[in-house]
Amino acid sequence: MIKTTNLRLNLDKPDHRKAYDILKSSEMSYSNTIVAALISFSENEENRKTLLDGIRKIVREEIGTVYRNEDFEQEAISAEITNSENNADKEILKNDDYENPDESDFDENEEFVDDDFLEM
């Protein structure tokens, strides 16, 4: 079955002029050139859609990975801060123990003891 269609090109329009120049310079008939162009355009459209869908999927996955890693890093940083604070608290307690020894070991008059008196 053969279908007939008309193609009108307005050569005052640059795109129409370009299409006409392509038709004139083609080694194929006008019909075969138009058929090949339409098929190529359609397949490229499908390929572009498939490519864009693939890119969207990859971007979503990467963004999800970044957010998961960010959460993991934030948890690690929080844990590190907590550990540092706990270690600092322990160090303060150690220093307090050193600066304020038990009262049983502490003699407030120790500095004033006369060593000569002890030798008598």
Image (cartoon, rainbow, N blue to C red):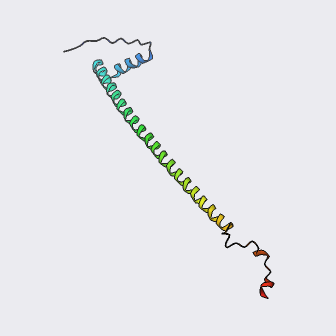
What residue is drawn where x is 40% and y is 11%?
10
Asked if 52 appears above or below 27 in the picture, the reply is below
Between 73 and 118, the one nearer to me in the picture: 118
**Quadrant in the picture for the N terminus:** top left
Left or right of 116 on screen, residue 49:
left
Residue 47 pos. (x, y %): 34, 31
**Quadrant in the picture for the C terminus:** bottom right
What residue is drawn where x is 59% and y is 61%?
90
Instruction: Determine which quarter of the picture holds residue 108.
Output: bottom right
Asked if 89 appears above or below 75 in the picture, the reply is below
Label tally: 0
Instruction: Determine which quarter of the picture holds residue 44.
Output: top left
Residue sitting at the far bottom: 120
Residue 20 pos. (x, y %): 37, 17
Residue 110 pos. (x, y %): 75, 75
Left or right of 112 on screen, residue 52:
left
Residue sitting at the far front: 104
Between 85 and 29, the one nearer to me in the picture: 85
Left or right of 82 on screen, residue 31:
left
What residue is drawn where x is 62% and y is 62%?
93
Residue 72 pos. (x, y %): 47, 48
Between 60 and 27, the one nearer to me in the picture: 60
Instruction: Determine which quarter of the picture holds residue 25.
Output: top left
Between 94 and 67, the one nearer to me in the picture: 94
Left or right of 109 on screen, residue 56:
left
